[in-house]
Image (cartoon, rainbow, N blue to C red):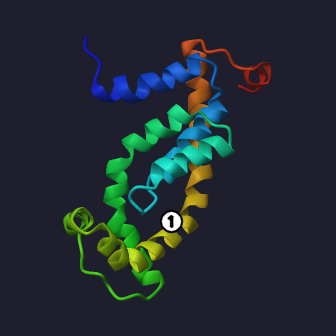
Amino acid sequence: MRESFFYRRLIRPILDLLRQGVTPEKLALSLALGLVLSVFPAVGWTTTLCALAALIFRLNLPAIQLINYFMYPAQIALLLPFFRIGEKVFRAPHLPISIPPIYEMARTDLWGAIKFLWSTTWHAMVVWAVLAPLFTPLIYYVLVPVFRRVARRIGASLPAAEVKAA
């Protein structure tokens, strides 16, 4: 039976990390931060943010970047909602724009696009900064027991303290 793209490129690498000894807690934190950082509402920054988080918190760099890669469509999909919430929070004028014109502006005049979208993007980043600390622990605490269960199922070695707690 042929494995799906999703399984081959996302699930199997995560299982392999557990088999290689990455703890469920470190993997959960890598994925939680990867998920949250990957929807940062400024295109082009998420790879750097994820790499910095991995270095600062001593997390698994391949895991966090894997999630960052898979979350790119979600980042694009969430740009406008972050823009709109930022407009409401800051009582800024509505910017009548959609994703295709943003890409076209960036492609033809990157500096002009940055100047045009600066205040809208800044407002969206503030909204993201308020929401990110709420979602990161939530995602982490959901993933830890899942990864502990998966690690036990695939026979990954858990530290003695985790085996007793599980």
Quadrant assignment for the N terminus: top left
Q: Secondary structure at mark 1?
A: helix
Q: Nearer the viewer, residue 150 or 119?
A: 119
Of the pair 30 and 138, the residue shown nearer to us: 30
Q: Which residue is depicted at the point 50% across and 65% down?
A: 128
Quarter of the figure with residue 77: bottom left
Rendered view: 154 above or below 138 = above
**Position in image of residue 87 (x %, y %):** 40, 81
Vertical arrangement, residue 53 with respect to residue 84, above or below: above
Q: Residue at x 36, y 68 (%)?
A: 81
Q: Which residue is mark 1?
A: 128
- Dividing the picture into quadrants, the one containing residue 12 is top left
Disc 1: CA contacts within 10 A as few (<14), some (14-19) or many (>=20):
many
Counting the numbered discs, the total is 1
| Residue 152, above or below 139 | above
* In this picture, residue 116 sits left or right of residue 128: left
Q: Whole-percent x and y of residue 34?
A: 51, 45
Q: x and y percent of residue 57 in the render?
A: 68, 43
> Residue 15 or 67: which is nearer the viewer?
67
Q: Is residue 148 above or below residue 36?
A: above
Coordinates of residue 135 in the picture (x, y in percent): 55, 55
Residue ID at (47%, 74%) = 122
Q: Amino acid at mark 1?
A: Trp
Residue drawn at 59 percent across, 33 percent down: 60
In the rendered view of the protein, which quadrant contains the C terminus?
top right
Instruction: Report whether 80 appears left or right of 157.
Output: left
